[in-house]
Image (cartoon, grey):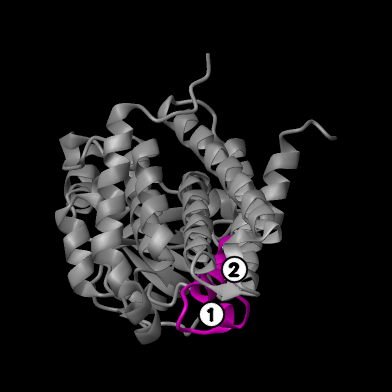
């Protein structure tokens, strides 16, 4: 029998995440969005609460939780602030999880442990000015020089880069072969000479998250910083990281959509037009019912992908399906909630316009919706 309900342990975790989000994150969300800067005090609180180590083994300083627990945290944080969601997601899904899966034991002790225990924050450098969805078009190189590698290149849209301590960067170590065979991954400390983080890129949404270009100019790292200790495995590592990252982004989408619905309901129960509340009109009720149904469907698909990953089963297609659906739902629902608030929905005073701005990027990062369709259709034996 399939159980679609959370067990008591996950319910308790969900309530803990929700309480923190409501009491600590929500009061700062509007201010952070306006300032286009994440609150470092809040970041420290999240570290202290162990939110950056949820799915990692206690052996490496993590909380010893599962992917589903992490997904619940992602939804609750994103329900009040999507910037908090993506900050958590990049650190967990893309950077630390990749080290946990592919790193040597020595690398896990040195690099994963401080990420899992929250003492350091990680980021993920893959996208370049000329290489977005086409990861194989990357031009950043890492040339072996004795017992070191010298990295040169530029990465853009590097989330968390403004305050990250650990940079996981992908570079070509062999330009004589296709990128999927010649790409490798490296662990770089923020204070390494030659690593420069540019000012954050102004954006439409998730404006509080740090997101900048990172320039690597003759950055020297010891050979022991080659992730996994083997060249040519970087492309595989990046693709696996993105597969897992899509589960977190799907949860972010669910949170954004649910947060927008919650705000719309609150407004519609107070706003009076034609002698009664907007919420009492059947048109409003039906619209909200349709939106909530779609959000719940996206949530269940996200849980399915998370549980599959927890069980060690193939999850990449489930993750792509969850992200495709959830990102579509997030954009549809946030637009609908703005419409339900009418003119006020367009005003910065109300949060639904922020939810709508934040939702758009979910159709782009961690693989565009078009890439998700490629992943899904590729599993359908169509050729």
Q: Are marks 1 and 2 in contact (CB under 8 Å)?
A: no
Question: Magenta segment, principal secondary structure?
Answer: helix
* Residue at x 44% of width, y 60% of height: 170
Instruction: Using the image, determine if residue 220 lies above or below residue 53.
Output: below
Is residue 346 magenta-colored? yes
Q: Where is residue 94 in the image (x, y as percent from the top left)?
A: 41, 53
- Residue 204: assigned label: 1
Identified at 52% across, 45% down, the residue is 243
Badge 2 is on which residue?
276
- The segment highlighted magenta reads 341-362
Q: Where is residue 75 in the image (x, y as percent from the top left)?
A: 42, 51
Q: Which residue lies furthest to the top in this view?
A: 1
**Image check: 101 left or right of 315?**
left
Q: Is residue 220 left or right of residue 206?
A: left
Measure the C-alpha gap from mark 1 to mark 2.
35 Å
Q: Which of 78 and 283 is in front in this view?
A: 283
- Mark 1 element type: loop
Residue visible at 22% across and 68% down in the picture: 42
What's the residue at 63%, 47% (across, down)?
A: 294
Q: How crowded is mark 2: few (under 14 residues within 10 Å), some or many (20 or more)?
A: few
């Amino acid at each position: 029998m399939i159980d679609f309900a959370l067990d008591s342990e996950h319910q308790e975790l969900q309530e803990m995440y929700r309480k923190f989000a409501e009491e600590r994150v929500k009061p700062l969300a509007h201010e952070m969005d306006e300032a286009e800067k994440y609150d470092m005090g809040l970041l420290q609180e999240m570290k202290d609460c162990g939110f950056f180590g949820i799915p990692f083994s206690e052996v490496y300083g993590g909380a010893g939780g599962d992917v589903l627990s992490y997904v619940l945290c992602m939804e609750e944080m994103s329900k009040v602030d999507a910037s908090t969601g993506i900050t958590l997601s990049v650190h967990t899904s893309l950077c630390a999880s990749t080290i946990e899966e592919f790193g040597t034991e020595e690398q896990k002790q040195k690099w994963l442990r401080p990420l899992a225990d929250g003492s350091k924050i990680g980021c993920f450098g893959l996208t370049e000015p000329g290489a977005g969805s086409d990861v194989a078009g990357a031009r950043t190189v890492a040339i072996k020089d004795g017992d070191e590698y010298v990295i040169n290149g530029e990465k853009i849209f590097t989330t968390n880069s403004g305050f990250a301590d650990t940079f996981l960067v992908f570079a070509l170590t062999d330009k004589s072969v296709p990128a999927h065979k010649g790409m490798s991954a490296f662990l770089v400390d923020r204070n390494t000479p030659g690593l420069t983080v540019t000012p954050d890129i102004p954006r439409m949404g998730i404006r509080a998250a740090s997101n900048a270009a990172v320039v690597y100019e003759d950055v020297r790292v010891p050979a022991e910083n080659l992730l996994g200790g083997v060249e040519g495995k970087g492309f595989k590592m990046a693709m696996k990281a993105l597969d897992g990252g899509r589960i977190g982004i799907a949860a972010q989408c669910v949170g954004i959509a649910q947060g927008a619905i919650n705000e719309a309901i609150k407004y519609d129960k107070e706003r009076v037009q034609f002698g009664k509340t907007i919420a009492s009109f059947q048109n409003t009720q039906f619209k909200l019912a349709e939106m909530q149904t779609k959000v719940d469907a996206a949530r269940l698909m996200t849980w399915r992908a998370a549980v599959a990953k927890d069980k060690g089963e193939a999850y990449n297609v489930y993750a792509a399906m969850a992200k495709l659906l959830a990102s579509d739902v997030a954009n549809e629902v946030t637009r609908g909630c703005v419409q339900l608030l009418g003119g006020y929905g367009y005003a910065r005073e109300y949060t639904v316009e922020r939810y709508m701005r934040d939702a758009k990027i979910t159709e782009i990062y961690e693989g565009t919706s078009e890439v998700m369709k490629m992943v899904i259709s590729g599993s359908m034996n169509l050729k």
